[in-house]
Image (cartoon, helix red, strand yellow):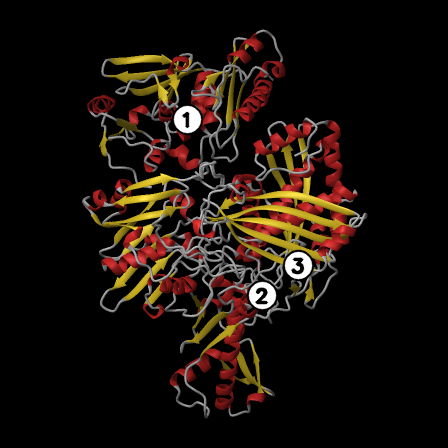
Amino acid sequence: MIPAPFDYVRAGSVDEAISLLGSNEDAKLLAGGHSLVPAMKLRIARPSTLVDIGRLADLSYVREDGDRIAIGALTRHHDVANAEALQQGCPIVAHAAAQIGDPQVRHMGTIGGSVAHGDPAGDLPTVLLALDAEFVAQGAGGTRTIAAGEFFTSLFETALASDEVLTEIRVPKATAGWSFMKFQRRAQDWAIVGVSAVRSNGGVRVGLTNMGLTPLRASGVEEAVGGGADPATAAERADEGTAPPDDAFGSAEYRRELAKVLVRRALEEAMA
Amino acid sequence: MATTEKLVGQAVLRKEDPEFLTGSARYTDDLSVPGMLWMGVVRSPYAHARIKSVDVSEATSMDGVVAAFSGADFDWAGPLLMAWPVTEGLHNPLHYPLVTDKARYQGDGVGVVVATSRAIAEDAVEVVKVDYEPLPAVVNMHEALSDDSAFVHDEFGTNESYTWANVQGDVDTVFADAPVVVKEHYKVHRLIANAMEPRSILVQPNPASEQYTMWSSTQIPHILRTAMAIATGIPESKLRIVAPRVGGGFGSKLQVYPEEALALELARRLRAPIKWTESRSEGYLATHHGRDQVQDVEIAAQDDGKILGYRVKIHANMGAYLMVIAPGTPVLGGFLFCGCYEGLAYKTEIVGVFTNTTPVDAYRGAGRPEATQAIERAIDALARRVGKDVVEIRRMNFMPPFTQATQSIGGLMIDSGDYPATLDRALELFDYEQFRKEQQARRDSGDSKQLGVGFSTYLENCGWGPSRVIGGILKYAGGGWEAATVRCHPTGKVVAVIGNTPHGQGNETTFAQVVADDLGVPLEDVEVLFGDTDVAPSGWDTYGSRSAAVGMPALHRATSRIVEKARKIAAHELEVADSDLKYENGTFSVRGAPSVTRTIPQIAFSAWRGHDLPEGVEPGLEESAFFDPENLVFPFGAHICTVEVDTETGEVDVTKYVAVDDVGPVVNPMIVEGQVVGGVAQGIGEALFEEAVYDENGQLLSSSMTNYAVPSATEIPSFVTGNHVTPSTTNDMGIKGVGETGTIASPPAVLNAVVDALSHLGVTEIPRPATPENVWRTIQRAGKGGSA
């Protein structure tokens, strides 16, 4: 109920946050806090120091940038869901953000926090993977851009270094067909299995939620669709290369079957 | 001013709501007193482990830690109360607030710390070093009763606590001769109540006078006072227990908890106020669970489906200890495995079993939902067996309507009943024929989403209870009467003190409606007080749908005594004989001279001053009454649920829900509807979402609200409710109970609907809860030729 003792510092800038992360072992960034704080209350997470970046207002924005849309890492889910640039230019992101948790969570949780947490059950990481999004990270040595396909490395682990701050997410405009399927028992739950499908250049990119240690691309499905397979046939390959968890929310066997059903439905919707 | 329009029967808004809606209600955790210390409980991480040593030295050396103790540091005056030894030879382990020999469930208390803040207390709990020797955990009942099982309580040499039986008629002969015998095996899974407010305790000692005040988030301050006196030896006369605003209980706060005794004992020992509030995940381990039965159900019938007999064997999981009414909880359903149906013979045998799991006790409905699930699922199985429709099979087996108490085959003397009437009313609200057509169309088209309908025509027993009966044949240690005091203040305002302890039921409104009508005063002039043993010294609190059925008649008796006394004073003042006065809507008027009157407030003023009272009449206008019913009350009704099942994913969507309940005359239809809707929502949670799951080592896997799925409003359908009134013959007001009907009636209606949706695939049973994966697996198995 009450976290183990920790220090708390509010960063006034990204640079200050980077320097605080570098100088405190086991320090963690605090943005919306909706993943980190519950883990701390259960004493599963015991950071030495929280570096609060929640008030860095200059990291909260959604703006068009040529053929891409740039989203500040501290943009709250509610603001992502309601950003006109996304609703018009990349509706799957706005739609998925509106399905996260409940209104309270969406008003606090941030897109950057959701991505940097690296939870394979999260909604947005899979969407961003299917979109081939780019993540901008800033560290002591400067700024670099990481492709979504390179970003999620393992369970709750990402390509971010311990003293790097995720500052921006860039998504391509994607207004052709898309589908976001989230299978959960209750509206506010994490997906037992989720599917994001985005059409592009005659093909389709498909992301899977909660089917392995990281968000995954369903490359077998993408290949089958590229080869002209119909949705039902292509969806049979939905669990290829996956390693779904076997837990209280669903067995691995059930998740494999759900993935096939949901991918078929997502393809039918995205390709319609 | 006397009112003329009766309030009883009207949907008046709840008097208590402004306090809740504005956030000004104060719950136990909102309270703090100067010098208050926080308690933290050291809990066993193992389900079963011998305690070799407990070392609190590191904890006591921490800044802010005042004291830390192991179980061995306490010498209790008595054990925690277990009030319901259902059989003579029942095995009842002595249960103390902290264990000293071995931990018997994950969460069992082995030590306690006291610190100046909650945060320090939680830090200190982490550094108490306990040397455990893990033992094999006994997790399920089948394993617990096998020959090579470890024992939860070594002293008994068995994990069986008791076997209780209710036999009516010659069961074996009826079954031997019956042309049809249906045998079913069901598992009623384990639940966690999840009251919105977690448990919380504050004890304030007065060391000089040795008096103690305990605020606790409890349903039972009166029973708790007695239980605390037994455990600590502090006399009841020096104990005041207050249940301030309590945010729901559902039976989980009908309990005498280790933490309550610990906080009281620590307040005495440390001469300081002690506070404790559970976290949600702590509560999942340390607050009692509900349900958890394995049921073998047999129905004997004629070829046409007319039922001849019932034979039921129940294994009921008690968990690690017998909590306050745990052995009796399944027994509350032990007369109801025949539902509202006829028969020639009946037998229910209940075996209470110890396991290394959190103790199990009452959860909304307590025993009756389990029995109702058994009979309402089994009668569908009988319908399938004899080729009858599920509505027809019910109709042909209903007890015929009756208005005077009538014996059921289960052995109950039922107050009144009209079972066909509630089914008829429900079918008026639901087009059954049309639904069957739509269902057939879906089947014919091979749609992946299939439709199903389920019925539950339930009967229950509640209004706990007639003291002589519950203390006699049922062997309950306590009583079941209620008490009320009505006090008329000189300005005409009225205070009603009641022995019930509402925690969400709306008694401040409904009881005030009765007083306002009886005494002819406006609703806003009536205050209802409760939940504090110094304010309301007598009563048996709130559970078992008893407030309106037992408490309200007590209150009505007290107001009648007020009227009797006021009549004497009014007659004296008006210089007429008592019999010359007519009493109506709070006003006495002289027959033949209707303008010559006295109102209750006027008499209250006269009685307060005492200047001119009739000979032998004492001053004051205050009366008390007790009411002990002769019998229980027996609500019934018909619920209909429809579902759409996604046969590819197993997802179940409840599409329509019709509930028709007969709870006797309704005091406040809005509050009754709220009870029904809330209860049905909880029952849908039971049928489709919620389950407390242990692994084979006795670790609770559903350890938080993330993985114990209480449904939210989004998952609950809209409801159609209807009512029907058959007055109870148990009390003068005709009232039956409504607090538990929803959770009793609804789970089988939902489960029957799910099975019905898949019946064309050969499905006859669904593991509970009917989660998407359980439904999907059932469909997979059916597809492979074997039904579940």
Instruction: Decide if residue A201 is on the left or right side of residue B237.
Output: right
Q: Disc 3 vs disc 1: which is toward the camera? A: 3
B175 up-or-down from B12: above or below: above
Residue carrying label 2: B473
Q: Amino acid at mark 3?
A: Val
Instruction: Decide if residue B366 is on the left or right side of residue B245.
Output: right
B338 up-or-down from B238: above or below: above
Residue B163, position as x, y percentages in the image: 57, 54
Q: Disc 2 vs disc 1: which is toward the camera? A: 2
Query: Could you tell me which chain the residue with mark 3 belongs to?
Result: B
Q: Residues under labels 3 and 1: Cα distance? A: 65 Å
Decide if residue B661 is in sight here.
no
- The residue that appears at 73% across and 36% down in the rendered structure is B438
Instruction: Decide if residue B339 is on the left or right side of residue B142.
Output: right
Residue carrying label 3: B167
Residue carrying label 1: A80
Which of the labelled discs sits on residue B21, or is there none? none
Marks 2, 1 in one chain: no
Q: Quadrant of residue A22?
A: top left
Helix, strand or loop under label 3: strand
Check disc 3: other Cα within 10 Å, few if <14, some if 14-19, many if 20+.
some
Residue B16, position as x, y percentages in the image: 44, 59
Query: Could you tell me which chain the residue with mark 1 belongs to?
Result: A
Q: Amino acid at mark 2?
A: Ile
Helix, strand or loop under label 1: helix
Image quarter hosting the C terminus of chain B: top right
State yes or no: discs 3 and 1 in contact (Cβ < 8 Å): no
- The residue that appears at 25% across and 22% down in the rendered structure is A14
